[in-house]
Amino acid sequence: MRWQKSLLAMLKERENKSIALAIDTSQLPARPMLLQNIVKLFQEVRPDTMLVQADFKIRNVSPIGTAKIKYYKHGKSSYTEVFEWADQEKIDTVFYITDVTGYFYEELKVNAEVFWLIPDEYLPRVPFGKAIRVA
């Protein structure tokens, strides 16, 4: 329950900021119920959250309560387009559910605050921002 309380506190602390929840859809999740619960938490606490579904490109951007999440089975993911989108849309904070095995351009400038939500027991090193294990 520790990560849930931490995530809830982070969402409440950012109530006057724009946020997005990005989901790496490059492969089927090992714990689909966990991801559904994270999305539900965002829906309930921050219904104004934009949900970004992306693998090697952005597949869908929609309000969090309206989209059906679709996963792909190719395993290729890139974070570049999501962070470029966040910059264009002036998103203050991006929460990204991923295993952090994707790539991004080294020259990419990320202006948003970033939290990597890792749905695994192993907490990898992240390229920037803060990693939070949600397993």
Image (tube, helix red, strand yellow):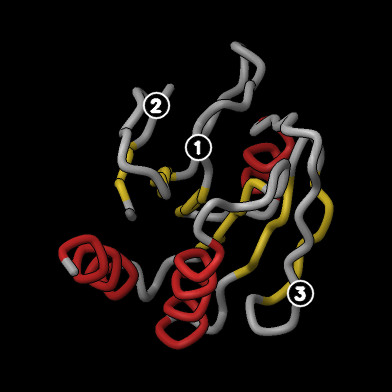
Instruction: Determine whether, in the image, residue 42 is placed left or right of residue 67.
Output: left
Question: Which label's residue is closer to the chain start, 1 or 3?
Answer: 3
Q: Which mark is residue 99?
A: 1
Which amino acid is tagged 1?
Answer: Asp
Looking at the image, how many numbered discs can be counted on the residues? 3
Rendered image quadrant of residue 16: bottom left
Residue 128: x and y in percent read 40, 27
First of labels 3, 2 by sequence position = 3
What residue appears at the point 51 percent right and 64 percent down from the top-left corner?
A: 35
Residue at 62% x, 27% y is 102
Mark 3 neighbour class, 10 Å CA radius: few under 14, some 14 to 19, many 20 or more: few
Q: Is residue 129 above or below residue 35?
A: above
In whole angstroms, how far apart are the C-alphas of marks 2 and 1? 10 Å
Q: Is residue 124 above or below residue 4?
A: above
Q: CA distance from mark 1 to mark 3?
A: 21 Å
What's the mark number on residue 126? 2
- Residue at the spot x=36%, y=75% of the render? 15
Q: Quadrant of the N terminus?
A: bottom left
Q: CA distance from mark 3 to mark 2?
A: 28 Å
Residue at numbered disc 3: 68
